Amino acid sequence: MLVPDELSSSGSGSSLDKKALQNLLIKERIFSQEQIEKIEAFAEREKLYFPKALLFYGYISRTDYEVIIRKAVPVGKVDLLIQEIDYELLMSFDQTYLQDKLVCPFKRNGDYLYVAMINPLDEEVINYIYERSQSPLKIFYATDVDIQWVLHKAFGQELAESAVYSLFIEDERSSAIETFTLPQIISIALLGTLFIVGVAINASVAFTILMAIVNLLYLFSIGFKFVLTLAGARFELYEAVTQAEIRELHDEDLPVYSILLPVYKEPEVIETLIYALSQIDYPRDKLDIKILLEEDDFATINKIRNLNIPSIFECIVVPNMQPKTKPKACNYGLVFCRGEVVTIYDAEDIPEPDQLKKAIVGFKKFPEDVICIQAQLNYFNANENFLTKMFTLEYSYWFDYMLPGMDRLNVPIPLGGTSNHFIKEKLVELNAWDPFNVTEDADLGVRAYAKGYKVGTINSTTYEEANKRVRSWIRQRSRWVKGYMQTFLVHMRNPIELYKKIGFRGMFAFFLFIGGTPATFLINLPLWILFITWIIFRPQWISEIFPAWVLYISLFNLLIGNAMVVYMNMLAVFRRRLYGLVVYALLNPLYWILHSLGAYKALWQLIFKPFYWEKTTHGVTKVKKPEILRTV
Amino acid sequence: MGIKPRDIIVFLFIWIGLFFTGAYLYFNYNFYAQEGIFLMEKAQLAMRGNPPRLENLGLIYPPLPYLFYLPLAVSSSPIASLIISTFWGALVIALCIRYLRWIPGNTLVKLLITSLMIVNPVFLYVIFAQPSQTLYVLFFVVFVYSFFRFHETRIPYYIVLSGVALGAMSGIRYDTFFLTLALIPFAPFLISETIEFNVVRIFALTLMLVLPTFIVLGSWVYLNWIFAGEPFYFYFSPYSYFKQVSKEMALRPELAQGKGNLMWAIWIVLKMSFLTYPAYYFTLPTIRTITIFVAAFAPIILQIIVIFLGISALSYSWFGVLIPLSIIIMYYFINSPLYRPVYAYVVIVIMAISVYFGYQSLANSVELTEKNFATVLKGEKVKDIFEEELQVAKFLKENTTEKDMILIDDAVGYPIVCFFSSPKQFYLPYQYDYVRVLQQPQFAATYIVVPRPELTVTGFDQLTAMYPDAFEKGFDFTTLVYQTPNWRVYKSQTQQQQIPIEEQ
């Protein structure tokens, strides 16, 4: 029913009043008077519209709210996603008011102005619209998601553009909008030409030099990782934040905490997400959670619309604009954040409940130049299959040993994709995330370090779903590797300037991690093929490109180097007591093959589809929620 | 506790002090490391040999000490070797000083303990005369200390350190492999004494502890395979360390009786270790946990095993490892319920007495260099151990040109090669066609250097093996041009055509 008769109003709404909703909720015994007053006080304090406080802070589910509203006021419900919208009409109203009150005049039909409202009982809003339009109104109920969808689509274009281009405008050289700069293209071409000429003149010498460079890269990489691992492992029992320190926090002193949740085509994980959010140990009224939906993601939007459980989030709909990436969505959502601290979680994430409080303690006790805190990431479906086991080992090693090692040795920390907690003011100062970089987190970590800021680590874990399918894993990995390549290219546009900013240690770490990681993945396969060819056929030409000193370095890398990396990976099992995985560490050479495949895909995409975001499919695991909770 | 600037200053101070002491002993008493010359010769072959390649180090000997000597390939002076050995020695002392700093107790006690460690004759001998053994001591100390720390803290990091140290030790001495093998069945019990019983966790920790040894030795087997064509070349080679040690052991009846005889092996090891450093045994009984006791007792266990297997030419200086280990044990001794402050002074007195024991064990040793060191400590000069080789090298230097090739076996002739300092002029066993040259030396060598056969008894010398009368009678085509009591240099009278060196 699109055109209700019962509430065809000339604008006076005499049966409605400002507190009609509150009274209704009391009358229906949904809340007591006291509870209503408490919610009202909160809404007033946070300058929130009362229905927003109800819906976005988990006091009532969306479906229950709809039932109550439509029972009290017999308005029709309108599906704005399929409705024809008169955007010109819409944009003639004050955007701020429409956003505040979640009201959406969406079209005219004859003399009537059709208006969708989250709270059709609100006389004040009805009168406002009437006075602005001087038209009789037809009121409909619409979900907050629907109204947000229309409003963001209408008014969000400018913001979306800013989300896409602000970094480019403020700091062009730091934007990955351009993959290869002209000097870089010339340099690559020159190097390539030099190599080809060298091969033509003396192939043996040319390949020898190449092998020497490659093997020295491996040698330094392995040595550096070994040092980092020991530095991180030594303080395995060290707790950056203790429970005692958390207990000393007072709720009233806690800042508002914004959480950005970019989701895209993930309706199946929404319930897990809501449950995880509900477990967060933080005052509800100090949470500011934004689910960032893409304009064309109808599946997820529908899921949210029909949620029958209370949920603590507000929907922000990101207008459709290229590049369609997570960092762009986060930049857009950041504008609406009210918190002093901001963090990001992915849709399938399950953070430990006290993570936010640990981050707050971290910011209090860490030096002032720490503007970001990275929590640890790990997987709740570690034992599902071989791939998840290896993935868990990898993540455990990285977050439990390498990152603390980097923290100890004061080298730039490439951020993880989620669970980075930022001081919002500093994040804005850094121009937030680069929407053209598919590992915007790694890039942001480098930019922060270049500006003299630091990233700290805390002893708190966010659990994610490890990819259990090989093809999906390779797609995900290709995005990460591509992002590292992008980050390397961006920051190497002026290496001298970068060196001045981050110093020798930072440059060394940057080269080895951001540049060295994709390089070693790419080089691995050819080297293994070379080795196997030599083992079987012993061709003379291989001996020629490995003179003595190169041969010995490469043998060291092959034997001791690989063994060391595997050995260090074995260490990863201890902190999380994943002892059963220790033997799987020995199978790392097989796992590395997948890394290489992902890297080649990344290289291809870097050239032909640099901004393409390989979407990771979630919700595939067979691990059930109770098991996840036990893990957490 | 990270490394502080004062730790570095202490280390540098000790290093410089040790170096100048060693240099003083060399210039004034003719005492220097025989092994250092051996290591430098191998480094020269690896970096400047004909052809220069890493397997010239000899795939026979555990590789780790040699790798540190590669930068010394440009030198032939014993002083150069001293730089490396005193570096490692200073590291051991500096580590022990750090540990001592954590021990509660007054500074005088710590100063006395440190001083008594540094002046112990056996410990000094190891530093000045046995570079690879010094490196071994360094890693042994790290291994034991890390194991102790794991026991205290339960942090797997320390098991990793322990495992890596054990792996490094097997790159210095093969017999460490047997220690690892012995640890495999016992390590789970030792580890479980510290932590709650969890089979998988204990398995994982045990794996972390023993895997590095297998990695190092596995890599070594692989390198033997690709460079020598035989994965266990280091065992089967005629120059094999195991063969040499077995021969040396056979010459020492007291040790030889221990082969296959466990009780005798235990007896001889306990006796020799007690005579070398009795203070060690006064600290051991204070340890109240099996884990720490076994770790602290590991050197003794290792020697018992290798004597039982018949692959040890044990000397008193081997027990130099007990001296820094005692420092670590002191920490647990002082924290033991049995500790009384007066006990620290008792141990200090015993450490002082151990200085005398150490001196006596060196003076009464069958090893010439150990005896020499004891003589030097009395303030007497000793004969340069390589005096003759130095003279031979000098003669060759003065009488050969760059085109002259010299045939020698460096199994015993290595000092000559080292002091000559131009390895490209030698035909040596590491070259693939050495046997061909041996068979027809008249077409290849200008000079042939032959040792007295008695010098090669415990080793293997291909030259002497092929020409047993060469020392006395020379060759049909040669004339004797130089000799010392143990060396003779023959010059070929025929035209030489240098046999091209083939690469495999």
Image (cartoon, coloured by chain):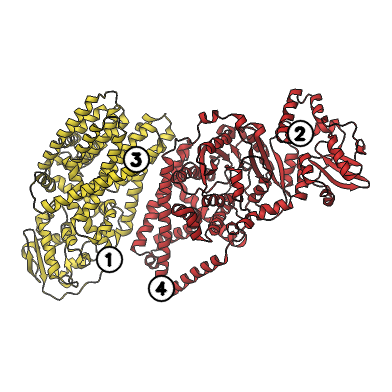
Q: Is residue B450 above or below residue B243?
A: below
- How far across and down, in percent of the image, does residue B282 sit? 21, 29
Q: Which residue is mark 2?
A: A50
Q: Secondary structure at mark 3?
A: helix
User: Which quadrant holds residue B427?
Assistant: bottom left
Left or right: where B84 falls relative to B214: left
- Mark 1 vs mark 4, CA separation in Å: 22 Å
Label 1 and label 4 in one chain: no
Viewer-side label of 2, 1? 2
Q: Say which chain tag 4 marks.
A: A
Dot 3, crowdedness within 10 Å: few (<14), some or many (≥20)? Answer: many
Q: Which chain is yellow?
A: B
Residue type of the residue flagged with mark 1: Pro
Q: Which chain is red?
A: A
Q: Secondary structure at mark 2?
A: helix
Q: Say which chain tag 2 marks.
A: A
Which label belongs to residue B162? 3
- How far across and down, in percent of the image, does residue B45 sit? 24, 61
User: Which residue is more in the foreground, B333 or A546?
Assistant: B333
Which label belongs to residue A202? 4
- How far across and down, in percent of the image, does residue B3 sit? 35, 43
Q: Say which chain tag 3 marks.
A: B
Q: Please name the residue shown 27% across and 33% down the image.
A: B329
Residue B390 visible somewhere in the drawing: yes
Q: Is residue B272 above or below residue B426?
A: above
Label pair 3/1, CB-CB below 8 angstroms: no
